[in-house]
Image (cartoon, rainbow, N blue to C red):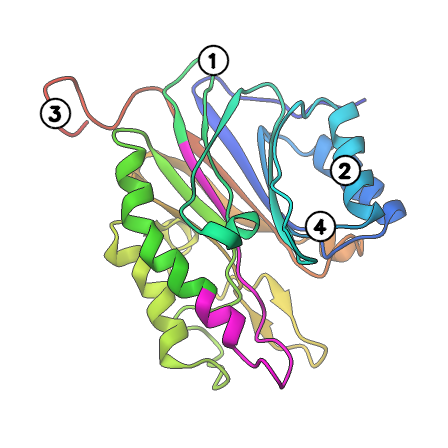
């Protein structure tokens, strides 16, 4: 069994779209995730409800990811799963009601640092012709409505919001006409709430595509936002799972400094 290394005072978060894997591929995904350095926390999107999901959870548990927040939907749907290796995790309300299985939130408790707030999101795709953008728009609006209260609930903790948002930034290269203004407003909402695009913190202009269409068009669908950009140690895409055919998405690897709270007892910003 391989165990990913952890650096004192930092927490490594890996965002990975598992593409509703069948059991055999799910076990390969678990082995790859287990071997990644700094994979202290996993945010797994597009997790199905069939045997592949059970295989993924079971294999990762055997590999040391002992703490889970994996709400199941009331009806058949994809979900987001949070898991940690050695770091306790306390689920907290994400404020999404019936859609909470796509947006679980938790407070992470590193042994050598301050708690971290985490919100993992999986935004629905554009959907069938009959329901084109209906579910996607409703979920994005629910996230925008819940975001202020969620950030307030984490108080002085650093916060990371990450997931497959199924939308690109307004100035994405190349431009994609398929997205509407309401989708770009969803991306902007995180900045308006005081969060910084973690990828852009380290790569201001690189395309940074995380998913490619069958025609080879690149999209930056997988995102991470943080309320304390000065705490970010690194944030970058890893295309290894795409090359290994473990997923059609790159994973997004983020490390954040959790050595002290954002605010002192007197209330001043650190």
**Residue 270 screen position, x and y as percent:** 19, 27
Which badge, 1 or 3, is on the more N-terminal residue?
1
Q: State the mark number for residue 267.
A: 3
Q: Residues within 10 Å of mark 3 (few under 14, many from 20)?
A: few
191 left or right of 34 in image: left
Which badge, 2 or 4, is on the more N-terminal residue?
2
Q: Quick check: is 137 in the magenta stretch?
A: yes
Asked which quadrant contains residue 212, the reply is: bottom right
Q: Residues within 10 Å of mark 1 (few under 14, many from 20)?
A: few
Residue underneath mark 4: 240
In this rendering, is residue 172 above or below 197?
below
Residue underneath mark 1: 111
**From this viewpoint, is residue 170 visible?**
no
Residue farthest toward the front in the current orientation of the protein? 74
**Residue 17 screen position, x and y as percent:** 65, 53
Q: Which residues are magenta?
A: 117-138
Residue underneath mark 2: 30
Q: Residues within 10 Å of mark 2 (few under 14, many from 20)?
A: many
129 or 1, nearer to the observer: 129
Which badge, 3 or 4, is on the more N-terminal residue?
4
Q: Secondary structure at mark 1?
A: loop
Q: Residues within 10 Å of mark 4 (few under 14, many from 20)?
A: some
**From this viewpoint, is residue 135 visible?**
yes
77 or 82, nearer to the observer: 77
Residue at point 71%, 51% (across, down)? 18
Label 3 near label 1: C-beta < 8 Å? Answer: no
Q: Which of labels 3 and 4 is toward the front? A: 3
Cα separation, mark 3 vs mark 4, equals 43 Å
């Amino acid at each position: 069994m391989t165990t990913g290394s952890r650096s004192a005072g930092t927490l490594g978060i890996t965002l990975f779209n598992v593409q509703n894997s069948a059991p055999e591929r799910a076990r390969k995904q678990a082995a790859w995730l287990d071997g990644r350095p700094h994979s202290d926390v996993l945010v797994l999107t597009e997790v199905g409800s069939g045997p592949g999901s059970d295989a993924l959870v079971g294999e990762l548990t055997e590999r040391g990811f002992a703490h889970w927040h994996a709400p199941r939907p009331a009806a058949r749907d994809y979900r987001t799963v949070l898991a940690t290796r050695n770091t306790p995790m306390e689920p907290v309300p994400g404020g999404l009601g019936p859609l909470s299985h796509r947006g679980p939130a938790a407070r992470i408790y590193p042994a050598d640092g301050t708690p971290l707030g985490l919100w993992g999101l999986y935004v629905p795709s554009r959907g069938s012709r009959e329901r084109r953008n209906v579910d996607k728009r409703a979920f994005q609006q629910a996230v925008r409505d819940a975001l202020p209260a969620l950030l307030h609930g984490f108080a002085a903790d650093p916060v990371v919001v990450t997931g497959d948002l199924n939308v690109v930034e307004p100035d994405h290269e190349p431009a994609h006409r398929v997205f509407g203004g309401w989708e770009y407003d969803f991306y902007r909402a995180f900045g308006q709430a005081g969060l910084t695009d973690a990828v852009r913190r380290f790569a201001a202009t690189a395309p940074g595509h995380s998913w490619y269409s069958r025609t080879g068009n690149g999209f930056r669908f997988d995102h991470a936002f943080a309320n304390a950009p000065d705490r970010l140690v690194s944030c970058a895409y890893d295309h290894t799972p795409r090359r290994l055919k473990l997923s059609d998405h790159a994973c997004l690897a983020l490390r954040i400094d959790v050595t002290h709270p954002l605010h002192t007892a007197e209330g001043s910003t650190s």
